[in-house]
Image (cartoon, helix red, strand yellow):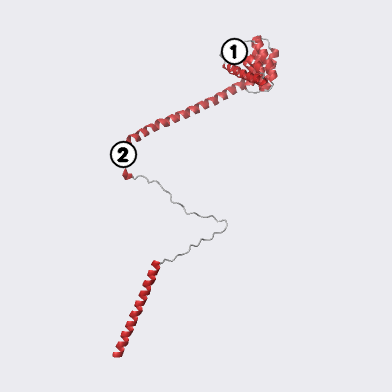
Amino acid sequence: LALSAASITYALDRSRHKMLCQKSQALQRCRSSVAMPRCVPSVRPQLPLGAAVQRPSLPVRTAALPDAGSFSVHDVAAAAPLFEISEGLETPIQAMYLVTLLGFLAVGAFLVVRQVLIRRELDESAKALGERIRVGEASCEDYFELGVILTRKKLFTQATKNLEKAKKLWDGDESELAQVHNALGFCYFQMERTDLAVAEYKQAVALQPGYVTAWNNLGDAHEKLKQWRDALTAYSEALSYAPSNEVALQRSEYCKQKIARLSTTAL
């Protein structure tokens, strides 16, 4: 019994010593890990060629919105009149926009309808005059009217044929024949036959010296031919009969400037 008790006591002491050793070793490992931390080398990942590098997204700062509870009853009461005023102005502004839009639409519709009616009236008049010419009952005035209608429709080649016919058959007052020459000159001018236009305009002002429109047209034709002095003379004649004619005033000033520049260049 004494031997067995001694052996048991020895075994217990040995186990306690073993446990104490394990505890001391564990405590030393903890101290060493705290005192000298291990440095883990960073390893840079290898990306394949051509791969895009993804950068970390930065945090976005957003403005903090005021909380609904931060508004007091006094603030809401102070803003109430502004809301009422804005609501009161909204309806008149919308009505104004609507009236403006309707006005533009009405003007556009009026112009379109007007052009359609004018075109229809011209077509009917041209048809009636053409029928009279076809049966041989047309007069020189009919040829003139048909030429004017074709001019307004921008059919200048057909207009010149009828106006030339009216000039040959004219049996009325010579002062009225000036209108035929002026209309012929306008058609030739639009057809880029400026020399013929100048000749017709000169005949028009010769038959009716106070024909301001023909004088302005003659000045315009001389301008196209870069005959600035002749153009200035034509506009001066127009101003002698109509001193407040804006077309003649503007174009005469322009011709004076061109003549002055040419004189300076020649010097």
Determine which residue is flagged by label 2. Answer: 75
Mark 1 element type: helix
Q: Is residue 134 in view from this perspective?
A: no
Between the residue at mark 2 and the residue at mark 1, the CA separation in whole angstroms equals 72 Å
Q: Quadrant of the C terminus?
A: top right
State the residue at coordinates (33%, 44%): 68
Q: Do the residues labelled 2 and 1 touch (CB within 8 Å)?
A: no
State the residue at coordinates (30%, 87%): 6
Residue 152's spot in the image, x, y percent? 62, 21
Residue 72's spot in the image, x, y percent? 30, 41
Q: Residue 239 carries which label?
A: 1
Specify which label sits upstream in the sequence, 2 or 1.
2
What amino acid type should be assigned to the residue bearing mark 2?
Asp
In the foreground, 252 or 134: 252
Q: Quadrant of the N terminus?
A: bottom left
Number of labels in the image equals 2
Residue 229's spot in the image, x, y percent? 65, 16
Residue 30's spot in the image, x, y percent? 38, 69
In the foreground, 258 or 174: 258
- Quarter location, residue 166: top right
What amino acid type should be assigned to the residue bearing mark 1?
Leu
- Quarter location, residue 47: bottom right
Q: How crowded is mark 1: few (under 14 residues within 10 Å), some or many (20 or more)?
A: many
Image: 27 above or below 106:
below
In the foreground, 180 or 1: 1
Query: Is 215 positioned to the left or the right of 27 in the image?
Result: right
Image: 81 above or below 60:
above
Q: How crowded is mark 2: few (under 14 residues within 10 Å), some or many (20 or more)?
A: few
In the foreground, 45 or 261: 261
State the residue at coordinates (36%, 77%): 21
